[in-house]
Image (cartoon, grey):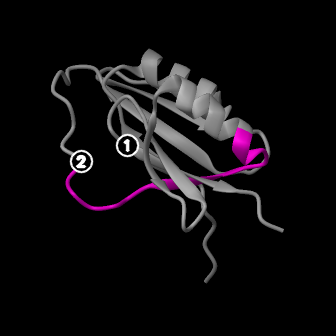
Amino acid sequence: MKFKFLHSNINVLDLGRSISFYGRALGLKETRRIDGKNFTIVFMGDGETGFLLELTNLHERTEPYELGDNESHIAFEAPDFDAAHKLHAEMGCICFENQDMGIYFIEDPDGYWMEVIPHRY
């Protein structure tokens, strides 16, 4: 049996802020939206792959999410690593750099980490 990747979900407190962050920081665009009685789900895509980032906003949630102390993250390849690093430095969202591995991480408004990797041939 073969399965196919579809999306990864994260819960966010301020949906507009998160949509703006992912649009500016990673070039993701809203592909579709589900508005429920107590929630809104927005799928963000890169326009190249079929993989989506699902942003879930629970309308009554007011407290930040406890993300734990694991190292879960989603990785993004940057075709122009130096330009991406410059943008993220200007945004002030770089939270960790591993220069030995040639990668870094950015932190979104809810504290989720996204790994940025240079395009490697």
Q: Residue at x 56, y 24 (%)?
A: 90
Q: Residue at x 61, y 61 (%)?
A: 102
Residue type, label 1: Tyr
Residue type, label 2: Leu
Residue at numbered disc 2 = 67
Q: Nearer the viewer, residue 79 or 112?
A: 79
* Residue 104 sits above or below residue 57 on the image: below
Residue 26 in sight from this viewpoint? yes
Q: Which residues are magenta?
A: 67-82
Q: Work out which quarter of the rendered image holds the N terminus and state it.
A: bottom right
Secondary structure beneath label 1:
loop
Q: Residue at x 60, y 35 (%)?
A: 44
Residue 32 in sight from this viewpoint? no
Does the magenta portion include 48?
Answer: no
Disc 2 to disc 1, C-alpha distance: 8 Å
Residue 100 % position (x, y): 54, 67
Q: Is residue 70 left or right of residue 49?
A: left
- Residue furthest right as drawn: 121
Q: Is residue 72 left or right of residue 33?
A: left
Residue at numbered disc 1 = 112
Tag 2: Cα neighbours inside 10 Å, few (<14), some, or many (≥20)?
Answer: few
Residue 80 % position (x, y): 78, 44
Figure quadrant of residue 45: top right
Q: Nearer the viewer, residue 21 or 1?
A: 21
Residue 5 % position (x, y): 60, 62
Identify the mark nearer the N-term, 2 or 1.
2
Discs 2, 1 touching: Cβ within 8 Å: yes
Counting the numbered discs, the total is 2
Secondary structure beneath label 2:
loop
Does the magenta portion include 74?
Answer: yes
Residue 33 % position (x, y): 55, 26
Q: Residue at x 21, y 57 (%)?
A: 69
